[in-house]
Amino acid sequence: MKKSARKNLIAATSVAALIAAAIVCRYLAHSENFPTALIKALDIVRTFIYLGLFGGWGVTVYRRVMQTQARKLLVITAALMILWLMLRAYKYYFVAGETAIRFLWYAYYIPTVLIPTFSLLVATSLGEKDGYKLPKLAFAAFIPAAILIILALTNDLHQTVFRFAEKPWTEKNYSYGATYYIIAAWCVSCGIGSLALMFIKNKHPLVRKLLWIPIIPFFVAVLYVATYALRVPFVRETVWDVAVFECLIFATFLESCIRCGLIQSNARYEDVFRAAADVSARITDENYSVRYSAKDAEPIDEKTMRLAEKSPVITNGKRVHNMPVRGGHAVWTEDISELLTLAESLKITKEELTDRKGFLEYNYKIEEENKKIEEQNRLYDLLQSKTQRQIDGVERLVKQYERAKDSEKRAILYEIVFLGTFIKRRKDFALTADDAFVTTEKLENALAESFRALSACGVKGSFLVSAPKMNKDAQTDFYDFFEDVAESVTGRARYLTVRIGSSGDSVRMTVTTDGESKRDPSENFPDAVKEFYDGEYSFSLLKKGETV
């Protein structure tokens, strides 16, 4: 059994055992064979068990739930459950006057109304950024909640929540008024609304399949309230403690939402970290003893890790980073050998391009002398026209690199790598003479290399090519379109994805990013379409009759 699964099993077993102990205390306390002092002691033990359970649940929620606003609201909900149980304990153990007991009974409806209201606000907070704050309109939910609480607390004046046939007014002699059913309807509506919002905001198909799990405790809560209000003898005799039962069922409802992913939590991070591939990282304690290690983590000696505390250390073509975390350090390596090779390659490419420019000028003067030179010049001219903007960009960046500060040179170098990658790959497309339908392997390799360069520039992304064969010209146009969009959003986007798919004899490229482009792609590609939806920019280009 995995460590995380074992922890969950131990936690569930412990909670079940504590609830069972509390139930035993409750039944023993109602036995007529025990002295009064022992009965009170059992009741107090039972109360402390539930207070510990809900307090502990609030602590675990604070540690597990990631979104700040949702975490605060859930902790407040746990505090309301504790308040409910404390009001109940004070009413039964420390108050003797009928009026005081009655008003403590009315006070139950403070947490009764607020707990479902806060669950609705929790659902409203989900899916938002970490610094998100609830809009003022969301707090309008407290208006009906406050009205219902005030009506419950002032029931002696109007008796619309509980009606008393005769004095003394106690819990043993009452019926329900219209406001009681409005309170019940408000609680049910908040529960349904929170569940619906969580379902709508979470679009993961696996999470949606697990929606039935939180529905079960919600349905049990509704059924219990209905049967209790109808005074069904079995329910009142078996589960007579409304406060405890409702707190347990609401905690179960919210916990099931966390467990099935409707409320995002940081559970199973250890397993995810260990299984991470292509990540050379590990987490150590303060003494650099490794506690967690990724699947592909490379061995690093303790001396190197300590040296990397102040600044990254380069060794054997790797850069070792050390970042302090709570209780230890996060240490990872970065392979920069390819970057150094690319820098050298760019230097050579710059020299080649400079030489090639003069060579092309010479070949144009003697193009009538040799047919072979004429064809070669034509191809070079094509390459020049398709990559001139990038060549100029490389030259501009090289000059900027020479003037830049040391802290700025790396970012400039990454941009040079990206432009150099396109120039290199675009040359392959231009020099390919076959115009027939060919495999998309060259296009996929070009995109893969360009995405590696983009990653160095701080733009994450991926691509998918689902057309097995495509006309060479179409592949070239798609690569040019990708480069045009990528250049226009570099420095503004955090991610960029490319999808190429075919339908019939047509094929479409769609580039999706979160950054606004510096220029409209239709300037260079009249058939391109630009769209904006839900915070994302989508650029698409359709080619007809280009696949087989």
Image: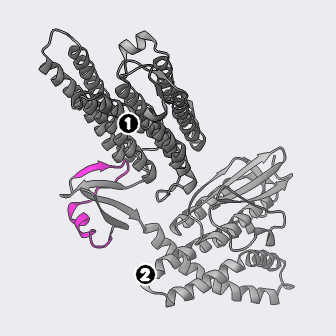
Say which residue appears at 54% left-offset and 35% top-offset.
186
Quadrant assignment, res 99: top left
Label 2 and label 1: CA atoms lie apart by 62 Å
Give the answer, above or below, for where 68 lies relative to 43. Answer: below
Q: Is residue 311 magenta?
A: yes
- Name the secondary structure under disc 2: helix
Query: Which numbered marker is on residue 107?
Result: 1
Residue positioned 24% across, 28% down in the render: 96
Q: How is the image coloured?
A: one colour
Number of residues whose C-alpha sits closer than 10 Å to that of mark 2, classed few (under 14), some (14–19) or many (20 or more) = few
Q: Which of the two residues, 277 or 6, is positioned nearer the viewer here?
A: 6
Q: In front: 130, or 110?
A: 110
Specify the segment rendered in magenta: 290-313
**Looking at the picture, does residue 272 appear above or below residue 361?**
above
The amino acid sitting under disc 2 is: Ser
The residue lying toward the viewer, choosing from 132 and 285, is 132
How many neighbours does mark 1 have within 10 angstroms: few (below 14), some (14-19), or many (20 or more)?
Answer: some
Picture coordinates of residue 19, whole percent (x, y): 29, 24
Which mark, residue 307?
Answer: none
Q: Nearer the viewer, mark 2 or mark 1?
A: 1
Answer with left or right where residue 450 lies relative to residue 131: right
Q: Is residue 491 above or below residue 257?
A: below
Percent position (x, y) of residue 375? 81, 75
The answer to whether residue 254 is visible is: no
